[in-house]
Each structure stands twice: as C-alpha cells, then as structure tokens.
Image: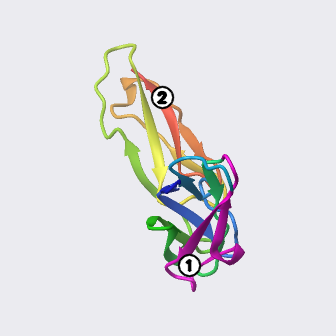
C-alpha cells in the first residue's frame, strides 16, 4: 500500500480569500500508485488562517501519484498543512498573504561570479513573497564596463523568481 511521500512544494503561499497556492498548486504525493482511490486526511495547523476544503479529505485517483489539496486563505499568517495516511504523514508550510501585501527582493544568486571575457553566467533574482502584479527589478553591473546584462527583469505576478544572463 502507498504511504505519503511528500506534501509539495514544501513552502507555498496563498492570498486571503483565494483558493490557489502560489507559485504552484499544493499537492499530496504518494510513494506509489494504487489499484483503487486513496483517501488522504489533510489538516491545517491554523484553521483561523487557512482552511482545508472537502472536509479535509483528499482523494488520490486510482493509478495516480498526486492530487491537489483544496485550500482557502482566510487571514494573513502562517499555517502548516499535514497529510496523513495510516501511520505516515508529511507537512508543508503555507503563508497566507494579505490582499495587498508587498513583495521585496530577497536574494540574487550567485552572489559573485568569475568570468573570462566572452563568458556567461545565469543569475536568479528572488522575491520574499509572490507579487500581486508583475514586479520589475533593476539590474546594474559593477564595474559598469564589465559586460552586458538587461537593465531590468520582470518577475511575473504570483511567481517568486526570474533568471537572466550576464555576458562578460
């Protein structure tokens, strides 16, 4: 019989009054497909912030490994989501975002890169929370004549990051 392999992604976001997790749907994943539907119990550690739909029961269809977890963001804050099947359980963290909660630049990776002339490196700009609308990030190189990079990159609404190339 299958066990719970994961609740993924391990960290997700959902907006107040919304039913879709960001940047991807929250899924329960089994260790193996089964010959009949598999009923998985799902709970929220903080029902005041995050509700689990369908009475807390997620059905993984016959022959499938995954099923989406129906959630509703209620109030800004953090909650854990735990899926349980028999003696196995796995959890994920879900942050309920306020309707207009702003995002800010969390990281740029890699922090530094060594390039030979003509070389290329890919950087990733990451926000702390998915933006409600596209977020523009300004890019500059130091020293200025080092190479070429886009002047700006845009992180789409409801996403966390975007990658771009720098050419030496």
Q: Residues within 10 Å of mark 2 (few under 14, many from 20)?
A: few
In the image, residue 43 sits, relative to residue 136, either above or below, namely: below
Residue 154: x and y, percent? 60, 44
Residue 55: in magenta span: yes
Query: Which residue is denoted by mark 2 in the rendering?
Result: 165
In the image, residue 13 sits, relative to residue 16, either above or below, namely: above
Residue 46: x and y, percent? 52, 82
Mark 1 to mark 2: distance in Å? 35 Å
Query: Which residue is denoted by mark 1 in the rendering?
Result: 76
Kindly state the secondary structure of the residue where label 2 is placed. Answer: strand
Residue 166: x and y, percent? 44, 27
Which residue range is magenta in the image?
37-63
Residue 164: x and y, percent? 51, 33
48 relative position to 72: left or right: left
**Frontmost residue, 98 versus 47:** 47
Q: Residues within 10 Å of mark 1 (few under 14, many from 20)?
A: some
User: Which one is earlier in the sequence, the residue at label 1 or at label 2?
Assistant: 1
**Can you say which quadrant of the picture contains the C terminus?**
top left
Dividing the picture into quadrants, the one containing residue 69 is bottom right
**Frontmost residue, 68 versus 20:** 68
Residue 164: in magenta span: no
**Frontmost residue, 7 versus 48:** 7
């Amino acid at each position: 019989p299958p066990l719970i392999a994961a609740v993924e992604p391990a960290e997700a976001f959902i907006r107040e009054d919304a039913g879709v997790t960001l940047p991807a749907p929250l899924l329960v994943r089994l260790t193996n497909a089964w010959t009949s539907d598999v009923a998985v119990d799902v709970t929220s550690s903080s029902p005041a912030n995050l509700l689990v739909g369908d009475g807390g029961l997620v059905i993984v269809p016959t022959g499938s490994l995954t099923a989406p977890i129906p959630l509703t963001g209620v109030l800004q804050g953090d909650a854990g989501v735990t899926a349980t099947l028999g003696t196995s359980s796995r959890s994920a963290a879900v942050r309920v975002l306020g309707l207009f909660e702003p995002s800010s630049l969390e990281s740029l990776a890699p922090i530094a890169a060594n390039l030979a002339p003509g070389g290329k490196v890919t950087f990733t700009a990451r926000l702390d929370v998915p933006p409600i609308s596209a977020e523009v990030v300004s890019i500059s190189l130091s020293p200025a004549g080092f190479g070429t990079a886009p002047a700006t990159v845009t992180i789409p609404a409801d996403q966390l990051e975007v990658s771009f190339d720098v050419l030496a």
